[in-house]
């Protein structure tokens, strides 16, 4: 038996060729895990190695991978995330999307750290794996079904001993909307990067897992002991019972009332997430300035309390019938909401709308109708479409409409006045179906702008083709660095100044700067070394997290509580220091950047829309007048990553220092 | 032949993480008991008593050591 079977990972992947329905098990050497971990790192390694340069993202040469995390299933908590990876049709570069639920452990219980697909099937297929191995089955009867109906149909026709874990696309992925995601567990979405689009291009309707193989680690008792210690802290993290959603806007105001840093313990954020999930910031973000308004050009003045109060998470939780949490989660941010009445019997329930969806279809569009957001949430989950990208794209259309660039003749009679709930819902339905005016918007904001004409480009809010999450870099400029510098741009979970403060990484990584009480937050608006170092650390630790299957909310609970490095050592037996793990994170991120460079991407082209760096600045609200020099901040980030300061291309020296020569990865070391 | 021992969950220790449910090879454990904590999290219940083979995987997997075979 190979030693790697006792290191938390399976030591092999499955490569499925959909063109000729063949399977290949590929053993992955231990050295690859030691250099890239599993999850996104393993995904980057496989994509770099097996996707030929210049492959069409929607062609047979692209590869779509489903990867679990190194820590998933090891007895560690908060490590039940999986990722879809591919060359993104939205950005042309490295694409990944992250999701929870029960799919991640099922991948490893099927015997693989990742399942990768190349080629294109002539007719719709689904992959089924149980303990007897993989089979490609006909899925013609499932093509056209939404994600929830697909899971139900598969559960009807496939009988196994173990409950199925199913990842599937909906109609959006089938008809190649560029903002399609992949759903599991009835509407949890790996939403970003157009991963569902690639799945649809391969005529792969679903991946269905029913394996029950053991996942073995080096030191299960230590893993459990770390988990028990974390659980004790999570159990104790509770807000006073009197805490109500009505207090959240006041909290938001108080957080922007000072320019001084207050490094609070991450367990406070955990207590808040336990109570409300991500919805805690539905209203708090409005008063802080974090939540974008009116296609990122407005402020709380345009969407005042009398409107945003409808998004109070207490009001949303009145519909919650039970909590929902992912495998191995001890926080439990999700919920299931009854929307039978709201939807007039159309849908019985939906996953509790995440903050991202509430903001993208609330303040971003000046829509104060909470009920519509429940319905839109379910429509997008079932259609298999990214709510962040969809909301941003509709916001773009509404601003064009406001300027008179779009007429009702072009929109098919839809009145796209800000806040017109009925038109928003109709447009979402059209985008999912790829019909009407929705056929123009279904591919995201960059393509919609290209179709409608160049003069609309300044209104198209994206970074490198991907629409940003609902967090404003004018409040937290380091967030803007990550929107613009990550190889998969536009994502809000990579890093921010606030995340850096919460995770307290300086307690583990000796060279990480400590955030001191009273530090001037305005320093983060300057392209200084501190900003470069913090953003570099953010990028690296996020790779380690995504290589482990870890949850972002565990990271921001604080690494002083969530012992990620100790978990990794206990699972693998490696005994690496936190500093050594950071080198792994840097290597993972550098490989993703090298993939982009190889695909002909100019990293500077991923620079986000200037509106998001305050160019021009907002004229109202808490972020009034805030701006920063994004070009300079990107430079300082590149510099600290070991990438060329001007171009963002990894330098030859950095690649050699990270050991790419030893790995004999052709092309990477050319810089 | 005596019945095999079955998992019994100690809800004082259980964190409702779902590891037992996810690791059960026969999916005998469901997350549906919601009257344990103030958040109404869904805690595990042995739903399929007669299908359960007493394999002990759930008990071995539980990080909280909240499952005993009885």
Image: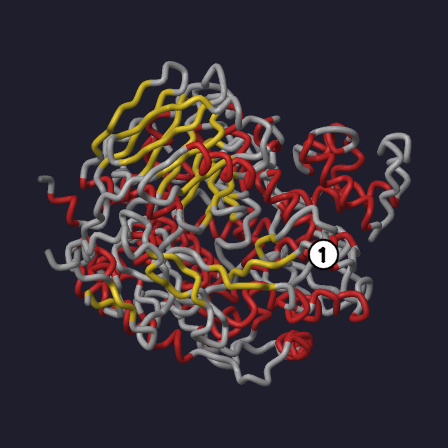
Identify which residue, A431 or A343, lies in the foreground. Answer: A343
Would you say A204 lies left or right of A128 here?
right
Name the residue carrying label 1. Answer: A341
Q: Residue at x 30, y 44 (%)?
A: A38
Callout 1: SS: loop
Which of the two residues, A465 or B29, is positioned nearer the viewer here? B29
Q: Is residue A588 visible?
A: no
Q: Is residue B40 left or right of residue A218?
A: right
Where is residue A349? Give x, y as percent.
Answer: 61, 53
Q: Which chain does the residue under circle 1 lie in?
A: A
Instruction: List x then y, in percent, for residue A617.
Output: 75, 58
The residue nearer to you, when weighing A525 against B68, is B68
What residue lies at 62% left-to-right and 67% top-to-bottom?
A: A317
Tell me the residue at 26%/44% (across/down): A212
Q: Quick check: can you spot residue A300?
A: yes
State whether residue A245 is above or below residue A470: below
Give coordinates of residue A186: x percent, y percent.
52, 46
């Amino acid at each position: 038996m190979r030693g790697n079977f006792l290191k938390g990972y399976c030591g092999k992947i499955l490569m499925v060729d959909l063109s000729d329905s063949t399977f290949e098990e590929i053993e992955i050497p231990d050295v690859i895990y030691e250099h890239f971990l599993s999850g996104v790192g393993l995904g980057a390694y496989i994509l770099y190695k097996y996707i030929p340069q210049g492959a069409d993202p929607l062609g047979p040469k692209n590869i779509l991978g489903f990867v679990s995390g190194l820590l998933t299933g090891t007895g560690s908590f908060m490590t039940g995330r999986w990722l879809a990876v591919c060359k993104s049709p939205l950005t042309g570069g490295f694409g990944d999307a992250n999701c929870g639920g029960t799919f991640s452990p099922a991948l490893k219980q099927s015997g693989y750290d990742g399942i990768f697909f190349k080629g294109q099937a002539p007719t719709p297929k689904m992959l089924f794996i149980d303990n007897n191995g993989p089979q490609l089955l006909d899925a013609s009867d499932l093509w056209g079904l939404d994600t929830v109906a697909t899971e139900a149909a598969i559960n009807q026709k496939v009988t196994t001993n173990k409950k199925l874990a199913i990842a599937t696309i909906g109609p959006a992925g089938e008809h190649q909307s560029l903002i399609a995601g992949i759903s599991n567990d009835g509407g949890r979405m790996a939403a970003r990067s157009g991963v569902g689009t690639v799945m649809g291009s391969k005529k792969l309707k679903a991946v269905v897992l029913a394996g029950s193989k053991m996942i073995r680690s080096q030191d299960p008792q230590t893993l459990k002991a770390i988990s028990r210690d974390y659980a004790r802290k999570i159990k104790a993290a509770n807000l006073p019972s009197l805490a109500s959603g009505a207090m959240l806007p006041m909290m938001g105001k108080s957080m922007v009332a000072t320019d001084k840093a207050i490094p609070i313990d991450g367990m406070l954020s955990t207590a808040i997430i336990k109570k409300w999930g991500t919805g805690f910031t539905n209203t708090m973000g409005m008063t802080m300035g974090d939540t974008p308004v009116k296609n990122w050009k407005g402020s709380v003045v345009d969407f005042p309390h009398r409107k945003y109060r409808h998004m109070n998470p207490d009001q949303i939780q009145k519909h919650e019938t039970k909590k929902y949490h992912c495998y191995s989660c001890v926080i439990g941010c999700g919920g299931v909401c009854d929307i039978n009445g709201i939807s007039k019997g159309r849908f019985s329930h939906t996953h509790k709308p995440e903050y991202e969806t509430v903001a993208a279809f609330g303040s971003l569009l000046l829509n104060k109708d909470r009920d519509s957001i429940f319905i839109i949430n379910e429509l997008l989950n079932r259609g298999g479409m990214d709510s962040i990208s969809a909301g941003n794209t509709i916001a773009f259309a509404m601003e064009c409409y406001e300027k008179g660039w779009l007429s009702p003749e072009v929109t098919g009679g839809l009145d796209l006045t800000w806040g017109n709930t009925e038109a928003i819902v109709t447009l979402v339905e059209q985008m999912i179906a790829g019909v009407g005016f929705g056929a123009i918007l279904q591919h995201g904001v960059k393509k919609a702008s290209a179709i409608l004409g160049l003069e609309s480009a300044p209104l198209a809010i994206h970074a490198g083709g991907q629409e940003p999450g609902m967090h404003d870099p004018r409040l937290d400029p380091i967030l803007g660095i990550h929107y613009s510098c990550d190889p998969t741009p536009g994502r809000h979970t990579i890093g921010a100044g606030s995340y850096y403060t919460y995770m307290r990484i300086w307690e583990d990584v000796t060279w990480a700067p400590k955030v001191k009480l009273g530090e001037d937050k305005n320093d983060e608006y300057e392209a200084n070394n501190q900003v470069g170092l913090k953003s570099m650390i953010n990028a690296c630790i996020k790779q380690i997290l995504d290589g482990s299957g870890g949850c972002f909310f565990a990271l921001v609970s604080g690494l002083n509580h969530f012992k990620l490095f100790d978990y990794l050592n206990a699972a693998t037996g490696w005994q690496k220091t936190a500093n050594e793990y950071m080198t792994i994170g840097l290597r993972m991120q550098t490989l993703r950047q090298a993939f982009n460079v190889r695909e002909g991407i100019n990293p500077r082209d991923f620079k986000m829309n200037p509106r998001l760096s305050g160019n021009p600045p907002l004229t109202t609200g808490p972020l009034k007048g805030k701006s920063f020099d994004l070009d300079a901040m990107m430079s300082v980030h590149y510099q600290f990553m070991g990438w060329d300061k001007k171009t963002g291309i990894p330098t030859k020296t950095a690649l050699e220092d990270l050991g790419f020569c030893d790995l004999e990865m052709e092309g990477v070391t050319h810089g | 032949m005596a019945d095999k021992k079955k998992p019994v969950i100690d809800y004082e220790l259980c964190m409702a993480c779902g590891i037992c449910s996810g690791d059960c090879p026969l999916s005998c454990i469901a997350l549906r008991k919601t009257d344990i904590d103030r958040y109404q999290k869904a805690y595990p219940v042995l739903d399929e008593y007669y299908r359960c083979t007493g394999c002990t995987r759930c008990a071995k997997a539980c990080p909280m050591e909240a499952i005993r075979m009885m």
